[in-house]
Image (tube, rainbow, N blue to C red):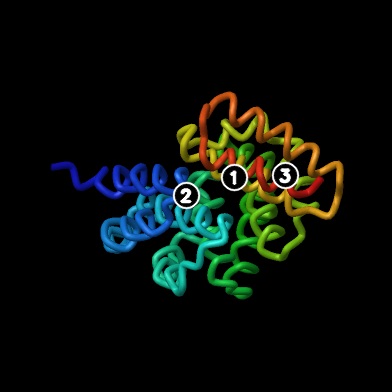
Amino acid sequence: KCSLLACHNYWHIALYYIELGKYDEALSYYTREIEERIKSGAMLDIVDASSILLRFHMEGISVDNRWKSLLPIIKPHISDHILAFNDAHIRMVIEGCNDSTIRKNHCDSITSFIDNNSGDNNERTRNLGKLICDAITSYYNGDYHKVVQTLAPIRHNVYNIGGSNAQRDIFTQLLIHSALSSTEIDDHKLGKVILEERNMVKKNSSLGQRLLNKYNQLK
């Protein structure tokens, strides 16, 4: 057994079911295998849980109060800023819970970190992490055009934030969903381009087909 990676392995299984549109199966894995393991407080487990819940949200699937169980776990890490990648997932939890006080604390802490520190993660946070956090907030505010304006210029550099291709796909999905939900026709066109790029990498993607169907309904 390797308990360190158990949650992450189940994350991959849940991801597979979300990709197929089998939400009940994915939610079952989350509840049975992932939600219990976030009590470890390990950042990898928090990253897994938050990214799964955001995927459900973008797919229009209710997760009830599951975000709330993550909030007390991320609170001690609000001012860590060890990885910009982690900060992005912390912001997912904050927005999922719609906690304005913690949101302000997180925003202020990121700004202070950028202004008063140096190093690799400072640069990544300045150039990528803060923008991704801002985009997540804009998404939850329903400002989809703002998400596109924020993420589109940096989308080819997001790999620098860290994480695996599978983990970073959440940011591609966020951009596509936002582009297709925007009221701007140019955003729709860009969303189609990015979706086609994703489908070239993830061939025969059921999620990709669902997003393509959404685009076609915009015509």
Foreground pick, 14 / 138: 14
Residue bearing the label numbered 3: 215
Q: Which residue is mark 1?
A: 210
* Residue 60: % across, % down: 57, 61
Measured Cα–Cα span from mark 3 to mark 2: 17 Å
Direction top: furthest residue: 200
Question: Is residue 85 placed above or below 144 in the rendered structure?
Answer: above
Image: 197 above or below 52: above
Q: CA distance from mark 3 to mark 1?
A: 9 Å
Q: Residues within 10 Å of mark 3 (few under 14, many from 20)?
A: many
- Give residue 190's position: percent from left, percent from top: 78, 37
Quadrant where the C terminus sits is top right
Q: Amino acid at mark 1?
A: Arg
Please state which amino acid type lies under the numbered disc 2: Gly
Q: Which residue is mark 2?
A: 21
Residue found 62% across the figure and 55% down from its top: 110
Residue toward you, 215 or 135: 215
Residue in the image at 69% along x and 39% along y: 127
